[in-house]
Image (cartoon, rainbow, N blue to C red):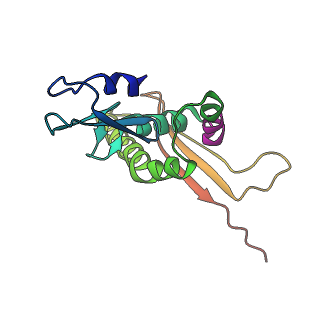
Amino acid sequence: MLLTLFTRFCFNCKSDLPSVSMRVYGTMVMVEQQCKSCGKGFKWHSQPLVLGKYPLGNILLSFSVLMSGGSISKVLLIFKHMGLAIYSARTFFRHQTKFLFPVILKHWTNSRESLIRQLKKIPSASWCGDGRFDSMGHNAKFGVYSMFSANLSKIVHFELLQVQHIYY
């Protein structure tokens, strides 16, 4: 339907039947119109670009899949069955590395620093700590240890630790 709309008239001079090309970049469609009458071109993007070249919808979809705990392969399969435009799994992982993980880490760091500033103002702060390394009957390689502030009711810090077995 976009192609039909853009082939009706030139968006610059309103003359009939300009030449139109469409390209798909993941979830974004880019339409380019070229008019023979006025010689001008017109470009339209279905979504804004981030940093001048990344379609915002692609980044937001990657963020949504990551935050929901969903599987990118399942989301890609759903989009394929619905006939929707989508990017590849490789692009999803590139978004994680380049955009999502750095932003999440920065947000966590800022949040933790804010919590520590709040805790320094409390004269007798109460702390709770707990660690989990494995389940019954299993031998885990990694574990997590969390520090919880009872005053703020928030986790202030956690560490992911690798278990090192020492045999004598």
Work out whether 167 lies above or below 80. below
Q: Position of residue 160 (x, y in %)?
A: 57, 53
Query: Residue 47 appears in which quarter of the rendering?
Result: top left
Say if the magenta span includes residue 127. no
Q: What stretch is highlighted in magenta?
A: 70-77
Q: Residue at 56% across / 31% down in the picture?
A: 68
Marks counted in the figure total 0
Q: Residue at 78% across / 45% down in the picture?
A: 135
State the predominant SS element of the stretch in magenta: helix
Q: Position of residue 154 (x, y in %)?
A: 46, 31
Q: Where is residue 29 in the image (x, y as percent from the top left)?
A: 40, 35
Q: In this view, does 18 lie to the left or right of 135?
A: left
Residue reaching furthest bottom? Answer: 168
Q: Position of residue 62 (x, y in %)?
A: 48, 39
Q: Residue at 35% across / 22% down in the picture?
A: 5
Say if the magenta span includes residue 76. yes
Q: In this view, does 162 lie to the left or right of 105?
A: right
- Which sits in the foreground, 98 or 78? 78
